[in-house]
Amino acid sequence: MPTAETVTQTLSAHFEDVKQQIREDCGLTNISYDTWIFPLSFLSYQDGVVSILIPTDNLLQQSYLEKHYIDFFRVALSEQAGINVDVSFVLPKDTPSLKEQGHETDPFPEEEEAAVTSSLSDFSGLNVKYRFDNFVVGGNNNFAYSAALAVAESPGDAYNPLFLYGGPGLGKTHLMHSIGHFIGHNKPGSKILYVTSEHFTNEVIEAIRSGQKDSKIMSRFREKYRTVDVLLLDDVQFIIGKESTQEEFFHTFNALKEAGKQIVLSSDKPPKQMETLEERFRSRFESGLIADIQAPDYETKMAIMKKLGEQYPVEIDDGAFAYIANNIKSNIRQLEGAFNKIIAFSRINNVPRITEEIAAEALKDFLYPDADRIVTYQRVIDTICEHFSISKDELLSSKRSAEVVLPRQLAMYISRKYVPNNSYKEIGKELGGKDHTTVISGEKRVIDLLKSDSEVERTLDILIKKINPSL
């Protein structure tokens, strides 16, 4: 019988071999191995138990390892040790002396390039650009990434539904497409469907309209959505409040869940914050796993841009990356837009190396200085007129037609909420000499609509982002 010291030395020396054995025994892809197994390290052996360290305090990863890999580790470690051992996956928070021992592990290993066959782009609605292997993982999205990968590896089993939420441009859609591609790659023949709520709504409307002439059309619509293996529905918040659409989705959700099919939903907020969400939807959305994506921190933004930079031969200084990271506060989509702009600028001007100064010059019209971020009446008026395709004279007039009433009320609401040092009287004056009671009434009308009309809520969000992307 080997001593505890001998077992410790043996397992510590051969732990990498153990991980490779599990990789082979489980037939893991590069992405699965790099996410779940590669970051693990041998911690200790005591009283017949091998403690394995998970590098970050990720309860999801701990739970997933215990469910899917603990038996494989028991077998592989017992073979190496020459005795039967048990296994425990340990989080850093449960090992207070870890840092004192100098035990450090990189929580985000570099991902290997994964081959993606062109056939994956043929799956309905999937964008071939969005895959796990080009999704940059950071502290802001690690939980959502792990959850998405767990779902992709065990669709219909791991977490169903998976509900992703976060602000616009943070990576929800990227993860949803990644799930679809991963399943399509590893489970050929799976019927996968990605769709936005807007598209789903339009199909419901068309099926109802055409179904009056042909009763089979609605049946075909239901068959399309209720026979898939994976349904990925983006921006589910826009379905809420549309009676016929949400009723069809309710029954589609139930049919897929009962059949053990995977459902992945995304939204800008969690179910508990959706004020007009019916309880029957709330309970179903919360029955699986809810994962949020936060705004990226500085390190994650730098990692995203360096990964983007690998696609281009031009040399880019860290100072240029830092300039973008410091000026783009929250939105990855805007971050990518800024990066693409400096690349275009370098090509047009034959710049061989992009420095911080070059980045500042390229982005001077893209990034607002702090003074220009102030919301003004003029910016509100111009943005609303452009969005609704109406003239400034129409907006500021006393016309009561439907085409101008809502835009005018939205202008009043936005001005009251975002223009600094305002008053109802001043807002009325700027919006065509309206009485202050008209402004109060217009603001109240928008507040009421936001409680019941998701389209108004969506329009307001778009307008605010157009007026000032940092809001």
Image (spheres, rainbow, N blue to C red):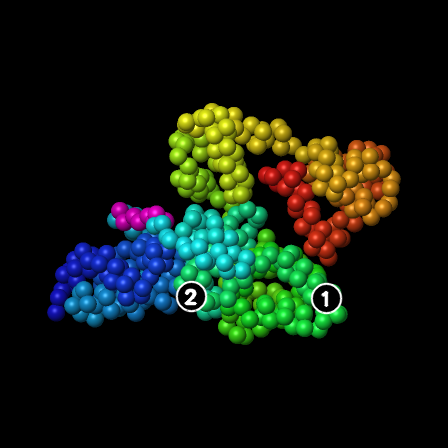
Q: Left or right: where does residue 353 sit relative to residue 261?
A: left
In the rendered image, the quadrant that contains the N terminus is: bottom left
Q: Is mark 2 on a helix, strand or loop?
A: loop
Q: Which of 289 and 32 is in front in this view?
A: 32
Asked if 49 appears above or below 408 in the picture, the reply is below
Q: Residue furthest bottom?
A: 258
Asked if 75 appears above or below 117 in the picture, the reply is below
Magenta span has 122? no
**Extent of the magenta region:** 102-110
For the question of whether residue 379 can be seen, the reply is yes
Tag on residue 187? 2
Magenta stretch: dominant secondary structure: loop
Between the residue at mark 2 and the residue at mark 1, the CA separation in whole angstroms equals 35 Å
Residue 418 picture location, percent across and down? 69, 38
In the rendered image, the quadrant that contains the C terminus is: top right
User: Considering only order in the chain, which callout, 1 or 2, is on the residue closer to the N terminus?
Assistant: 2
Frontmost of labels 2 and 1 is 1
Residue pictured at 50% horizontal, 60% vertical: 123
Tag on residue 210? 1
Magenta span has 104? yes
Question: Mark 2 packing: few (<14 Cα in 10 Å), some, or many (20+)?
Answer: few
Residue 318 picture location, percent across and down? 40, 32
